[in-house]
Every structure is written in C-alpha cells, then in structure tokens.
Image (cartoon, grey):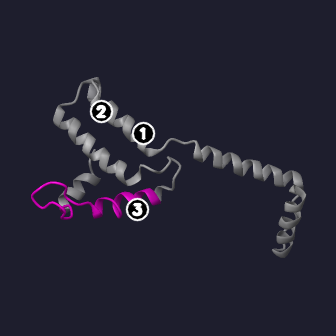
C-alpha cells in the first residue's frame, strides 16, 4: 500500500516536473506531518484556559500582590472573560491568530447585544465596545 501511494505521488511529481520522492523520504514527511497534527490536537482549548483564569481571579489571590479582588471586580472579570469564552471557546491555542481576531471583533464584540434593560436586545454602544477591546 505504501509503495502504491509512492507510485501515485511520484507520478504527480513527474507531471509537475519535480524529482521523484524515495519511499524513506515519503515516510519521514508523513511522520513529521502526523506529529504536527498530533501536537495541534493535544493543545489546550481556550475554554479551559479561560475557566482557569476566572478561577484564579475569583480566588483569594487574584489581585495585584496576591490580594483578593473586590466583589465588583470579580464580577467584571467574570463578565468580560465569559464574553471572550463565548467567542473563541471551541478553538485550540494553535488556531490561526487572524481567525481568532476576526471572531472576537467582527463576529463577537461588534455583534454583541445588551442583555439587561434598558435597551435589551440592542447593539452595544460604541463606548462599551471600545472599553471591552481596550480593557487592561
């Protein structure tokens, strides 16, 4: 089967006017490709990392100097990170940065709606979008 695959690959390489690949080189390339894919799959998901950060920030040492954050600050961290989680939680940390940037801004923040009254269901105000993007 491997020899048959090498024959097909070398036929295509010949059509492209490229030199043929030896079977040993073919197996090295396949091994490299499979290892790269395995590493990508085994990377942590953003949802796990965001949950861990929420847990740290909500804990007794989540603030500057290992101090506890105020309840309002904890709530704000939880809210902002929950928004981020809703945008990119299904992706691994090796996902393309440009796709993540697009998902967070164009698909996420720019299409976000208010969840409380007044104005429930209306898009976020420009100032809210700006604060969400530029939060420290």
Q: How many angstroms separate mark 1 from mark 2 (CA)? A: 12 Å
**Magenta segment includes 105:** yes
- Which residue is found at the position 23% from the left and 26% from the top? 68
Residue 114, percent from left and from top: 19, 58
Q: Report which residue position mark 3 lands on.
A: 102
Q: How many angstroms separate mark 3 from mark 1 (CA)? A: 20 Å
Q: Is residue 54 left or right of residue 39?
A: left
- Which residue is found at the position 39% from the left and 59% from the top? 103
| Whether residue 7 is situated above or below residue 133 in the rendered picture | below
**Magenta segment includes 81:** no
Residue 78, percent from left and from top: 27, 41
The image quadrant that residue 124 belongs to is bottom left
Judging from the image, what secondary structure is the residue with disc 2 in? helix
Judging from the image, what secondary structure is the residue with disc 3 in? helix
N-terminal of the pair, mark 3 or mark 2, is 2
Q: Report which residue position mark 1 lands on.
A: 49
Q: Is residue 33 left or right of residue 41?
A: right
């Amino acid at each position: 089967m491997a020899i048959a695959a090498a024959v097909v690959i070398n036929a295509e390489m010949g059509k492209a006017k490229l030199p043929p690949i030896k079977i040993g080189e073919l197996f090295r390339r396949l091994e490299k490709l499979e290892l790269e894919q395995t590493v990508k799959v085994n990377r942590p998901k953003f949802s796990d990392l965001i949950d861990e950060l929420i847990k740290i920030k909500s804990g007794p040492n989540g603030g500057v100097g290992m101090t506890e954050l105020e309840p309002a600050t904890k709530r704000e961290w939880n809210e902002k990170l929950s928004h981020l989680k809703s945008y990119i939680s299904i992706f691994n940390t090796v996902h393309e940065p440009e796709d993540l940037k697009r998902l967070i801004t164009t698909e996420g923040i720019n299409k976000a709606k208010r969840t409380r009254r007044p104005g429930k269901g209306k898009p976020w105000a420009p100032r809210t979008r700006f604060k969400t993007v530029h939060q420290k």
